[in-house]
Amino acid sequence: MFITLEGGDGCGKSTQARLLAETLRSAGHEVVLTREPGGSPGAERIRSLVLQDDTLSPESTLLLFTAARRDHVENTIRPALAAGKIVICDRYVDSSRVYQGLDNPVARSRIDALHQLMIALDPDLTLIFDIDGDTADARRTIRDKASDRFEVRPREFHDGVRAGFRAIVAEHPGRCRLLDAGRSIREVSDMVLASLPETLLAPLLADLPQPG
């Protein structure tokens, strides 16, 4: 199964991706936890460029993200799925649709065309973490890491990102689940697990005490 986690900066999806991977491993699954941009040696090299160089045009950024995703899919995601593993990816094509779409209103059709031509792999399940602007701002402020060129954009940009992800949920209700990421880590983790097919968690459920 291919699961992606999406949302604006500060929504907590990276923490939830790690917790989900730990839970599924404890249920006996082989899990590959990966991220975008990055997730393979070639894609990681592109990541260091695309997240820091603010001189890149929207078109160049889009092509670099697509190149990174192609390398990631070829060298990490498809081999893991072919081996029967669960792949959990922190960001994927929906992030391109939202972030690059804000920088360039005509980019969405190009993103979809490039995805179909060069990637042609969609997630089985996408969890989109939704959080209000004030909470996201506070989380971004206290995070102990260098900000990339997207994180330092003004509040209006991040509000647009939130609206963009909510639109993705409406557009793809079959594979997308909208989760309230403003709750506690434990509460959000419970919502994540509730979004999964029960068969993935069956070994854990079997170990729980049965009523009566």
Image (spheres, helix red, strand yellow):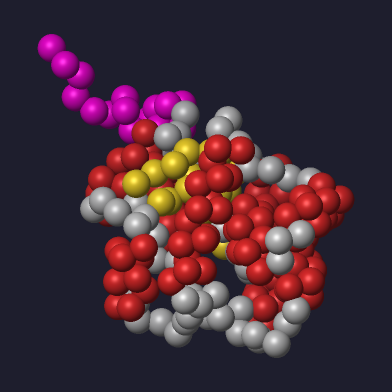
Up-down relation of residue 9 to residue 54 (above or below): above
Classify the position of the N terminus by image quarter.
top right
Q: Position of residue 195 (x, y in %)?
A: 42, 35
Residue 34 location, quadrant:
bottom right
Residue shown at the point (69%, 43%) measured from the top left: 122
Q: Position of residue 56 (x, y in %)?
A: 73, 82
**Closest to the observer, 97 or 123:** 97
Residue 143 visible to an observer of this rendering: yes
Residue shown at the point (39%, 44%) measured from the top left: 179
Residue shown at the point (27%, 29%) measured from the top left: 207
Up-down relation of residue 88 to residue 35 (above or below): above
Residue 139 visible to an observer of this rendering: no
Q: Does 211 appear in magenta?
A: yes
Give the side of residue 155 with respect to residue 84, left or right: left
Residue lying farthest top? Answer: 212
Up-down relation of residue 204 to residue 44 (above or below): above
Residue shown at the point (31%, 25%) measured from the top left: 206
Give the side of residue 153 with respect to residue 205, left or right: right
Residue 55 location, quadrant:
bottom right
Residue lying farthest left? Answer: 212
Q: Position of residue 30 (x, y in %)?
A: 52, 46
Q: Position of residue 175 (x, y in %)?
A: 57, 35
Up-down relation of residue 151 to residue 111 (above or below): below
Residue lying farthest right? Answer: 117
Which stretch appears magenta? 198-212
Q: Does 97 appear in magenta?
A: no
Prevailing SS of the magenta stretch:
helix
Classify the position of the C terminus by image quarter.
top left
Give the side of residue 110 with respect to residue 15, left or right: right
